[in-house]
Amino acid sequence: MTTTQHASRRAGVRAVTDGEDRADRRRFVVALVVSAVLFAVVGLRFGEDVAMQLLKTPTTELGWRLIGWMVAAPPWVLVMVSWHERGRLSADQRRRRGLLLGAWIGLSMFVLPSRFGGVEHEFGTGALVGEPLSVGWAWGGLAALIGLAFSGVVLLVLHRSVASPTPTQRDMTVRFLERAWLVLLVVSLGFALYGGRTGVFHGGT
């Protein structure tokens, strides 16, 4: 026990209390919900205006696909990593990361309506931006769903296999999931950039 505590101190890991965990989760959920509502309103009411401004930037179609993918795919794995490593972070660092990641995930609501109502309906004459942005987001969103489902299955198997996973077992599981997510993100990025040729996710319909 004493050896473990000394090793934890050397690694810069400290215990996070249940109260701090609850506060961090609440802060993250509030940031996610508020940003999701905000970006949904902006997308539905001002999507075309925003897209027309984005058209003025020197960004190619592949660039917008990349940006769309970045909105949807990376934040979920960063949430998992940040939560697992929260013992290494100060309260201010956890607060900032929670707010940032919550807002990052909520940003998806700027693009999501175009997947249902159509790119032209949301972005209008700015569809030249909205189309690749939406396609990249869709591939990133698919990767996020697959990653979350796979992570859920792995964690379920872990908890069914042992009554109470040890810190070492949890750490090994998270490291495995990090590598699996990395492979998934690389594959989905390839599809986000070049999968449009297949016609999948084309046109937001």
Image: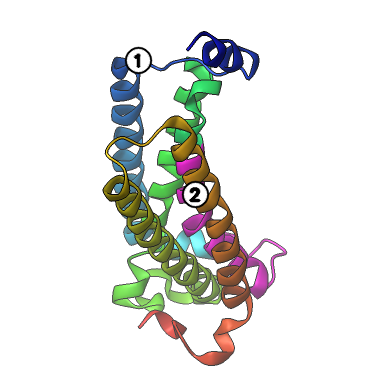
Question: Is residue 28 inside the magenta stretch?
Answer: no
Question: Is residue 76 inside the magenta stretch?
Answer: yes
Pointers 1 and 2 in contact (C-beta within 8 Å): no
What kind of element bears circle 2? helix
Q: Earlier in the sequence, mark 1 or mark 2?
A: 1
User: Which quadrant would residue 43 be assigned to in this image?
Assistant: bottom left
Residue, disc 2: 77
Asked if 135 appears above or below 75 in the picture, the reply is below
User: Which quadrant would residue 19 be assigned to in this image?
Assistant: top left
Residues packed near mark 1 inside 10 Å, few (<14), some (14 to 19) or many (20 plus): few
Range of residues picked out in magenta: 52-81
Asked if 203 appears above or below 186 in the picture, the reply is below
What kind of element bears circle 1? loop
Cα distance between the residues tagged 1 and 2: 23 Å
Colouring used for the render: rainbow
Residue, disc 1: 17
Residues packed near mark 2 inside 10 Å, few (<14), some (14 to 19) or many (20 plus): some
Say whether residue 100 is visible. no
Discs 1/2, front? 1
Give the residue type that dot 1 points to: Thr
Q: Quadrant of the C terminus?
A: bottom left
Residue found at the very far right of the displayed protein: 58
Residue visible at 53% across and 63% down in the picture = 68
Q: Main secondary structure of the magenta part?
A: helix
Give the residue type that dot 2 points to: Val
Please state the horizontal and vertical placement of residue 202, each as a whole percent of the image: 46, 85
Please state the horizontal and vertical placement of residue 5, each as a whole percent of the image: 52, 12
Please state the horizontal and vertical placement of residue 36, each as a whole percent of the image: 33, 48
Asked if 21 appears above or below 52 in the picture, the reply is above
Say whether residue 27 is visible. yes
